[in-house]
Amino acid sequence: MTKILDKIHDPKDIRALSLDDKKTLCKEIREELITTVSKTGGHLASNLGVVELTVAIHSVFNTPEDKVVFDVGHQTYVHKMLTGRRDRLATLRKMDGLSGFPKRSESIYDTFETGHSGTSISAALGMARARDIKGDSYRVIAVIGDGAMTSGMALEALNDAGASATDLIVILNDNEMSIDPNTGGLNQILSKMRTKPFYRNSNKNIRSLTLKIPFIGKKIVSSIRRLKHGIKQLIIPNMFFEDIGFKYLGVVDANDYEKIEAMLYRSKDLKGPILVHAKTIKGKGYKPAENNPDLFHGVGPFDIKSGKPLKEPAKDYSEVFGQTLVKLAHKNPKIAAITAAMASGTGLLEFKKEFPDRFFDVEIAEQHALTLAAGMAANGIVPVISIYSSFFQRAYDQLIHDVCMQNLHVVMCLDRSGIVGSDGETHQGIFDLAFLRPVPNLKILAPKDFKELEAMLEYAVSYYDAPIIIRYPRGSEAKDYFKDDHEYYLKLLLENKAETIKKGTDFTIVSIGKMAHNALEAIRLLNKEGLNGTLINVMALKPLDLSTIIKESSLSKKLITIEDGVIEGGLYSELLDRLNDEGLNDYQILGLAYPDDFIKQGTIDEIEAKYQLDPKGIAAKIKETFFKDMI
Ligand SMILES: Cc1ncc(C[n+]2csc(CCOP(=O)(O)OP(=O)(O)O)c2C)c(N)n1
């Protein structure tokens, strides 16, 4: 039987459907989403929640003339299915396949690229202002979740948009969840709006309520007019959106197709900034996802019937970080942990359970997280923050101005550093070494395996007292070639020494973090061809232990740096600068890293192979550069 979905080639086809057919379409989309994502992995729960909303948006608005900006962009699979990309859905998040986020190069319907939270209202307002300057008249719509709404940027944009007369529609997709359950004051306001109809029609209600007070009711109404803000704020806590300048429409059940379509029609011809409060259920229509929306926020391939992952996840760096921090916190009551809406992703759930009074989830507020930590450190606490490397980009000024300038003891753990894989360009943590290196007072460490991470965390918390970064990659450690000796690593850290892993005479590889594994494999490959290499694991990018590097390369004077970041500004740059400072210019140096570019999605192995940062590629580059006559 042909499906209605088979007839949808672009949104015009949806607009031609009857209401009943649109409802059937939603059912078909949901089934296909579950089947596809069970194979590809991806952001299932968020997409299941927005099926009706996305169909209604494309049905009510005249896309692509009208422009829709999706915040974070992880909930755009339905949008992709409806805008001519359904046949490629199985390639989602794979190398050369469809991106898991909006991409302007993919479709005219993807108006703005996202991946990091909280940008949609700013971008949509920018588009709306551009439209007005050019004298055009289409609509601009931002779709933002209640999680993303906690981002500082989203609040900055609301503040700007609300005070202007710019026509703009913001659809707040409120499912009460960020990745983990939403917390914070804004969530409390939304919760009241969701559950207490009184608050929703506040203007009308307060008037009729006060008029019922005998004799003095009328007087109160006029006082309210005069003292509008003060009194309203006292009685009605939810005036947030209206008071900031938006016309508020809601709450609407946006998993009921008819209701959300009607509400969007209502919003369509209103002037000025409009906020549509749409309530959805994360994971809607698939029980395992509805019951555990956090687990199904981002999933790997899973069995549809049981909802269980096809592959049990191996122990990863985040887990090791979380467990080590719990151990340290038992010994030291001054340790506190901070996350920006990533408690589960960064391995902090156990800490949260064990030490609820020392755990702070600030929601999607990386900037605030850093300055909060700086304040704690200035007052005698040892704050440990864990943030994904690419999200940490948000907090650069706070790092410089609040943490490092005051030389405060804040321990900053950058999870998902280096290549992260299928999330692609927006999430690769490849710029951190480059942007961290110039910051004064900052020590930068990177472990090559779990054991080293444990030692680094203990060192950072217990033996160091200034700003310190530990950056580590996504996933598990590679095969265990290395020393299983905590004290050995602690001693090296205390002495500011790099680790010499292997000695040889023909060349010296200087690696940082997990790249030691590929480097060692490359040395083994070259060894089979008669070449003997040295491997130095620097452990710290800053301060760099130049003396060990010089000592271990004095015979060959052939140096190779390997890092999982961009070539500009990281380990290669640091080594060149330090050699230059010392006037050592008789070295041949090869820098192996990612090009100065945005690196697209793929598995980590595929990406390493593509950029010749896998063992084979590294060995080939070393031969090509230093041992040409062997080729
Ligand atoms: C700056 C930044 N920090 C953290 C994240 C990780 N992140 C991705 S989605 C998400 C939760 C978003 O919640 P919400 O906007 O309510 O969308 P939902 O998935 O619930 O529909 C978070 C924290 C991010 N994308 N960007």
Image (cartoon, rainbow, N blue to C red):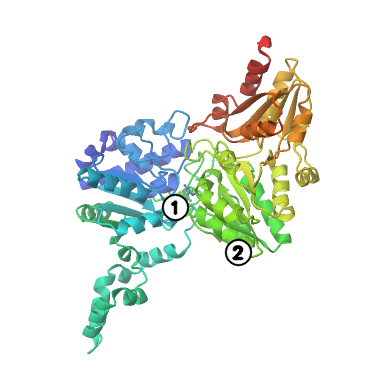
Q: Look at the image and tell me whether residue 31 can be seen.
A: yes
In contact (CB < 8 Å): disc 1 and disc 2? no
Q: Amino acid at mark 2?
A: Pro
Q: Quadrant of the C terminus?
A: top right
| Residue 79 image point, x, y percent | 33, 41
Question: In which image quadrant can residue 539 be found?
Answer: top right
Q: As displayed, is residue 89 above or below residue 167?
A: above
Q: Which mark is residue 185?
A: none
What residue did someone put label 2 on? 356
Q: Quadrant of the N terminus?
A: top left
Residue drawn 66% across the image and 33% down it? 575
| Residue 126 image point, x, y percent | 32, 47
Q: Amino acid at mark 1?
A: Glu
Give the farthest residue toward the bottom.
215
| Residue 473 image point, x, y percent | 61, 40
| Residue 388 image point, x, y percent | 55, 46
Residue 613 appears left or right of 14: right
Question: How crowded is the residue under tag 2: few (<14 C-alpha within 10 Å), some, or many (20+)?
Answer: few
- Earlier in the chain: of badge 1 and badge 2, it is 1
User: Residue 602 versus residue 426: which sits nearer the camera?
Assistant: 426
Residue 553 appears left or right of 12: right
Residue 14 appears left or right of 398: left
For mark 1, give the secondary structure: helix
Q: How many marks?
A: 2
What residue did someone put label 1 on? 290
For mark 2, give the secondary structure: helix
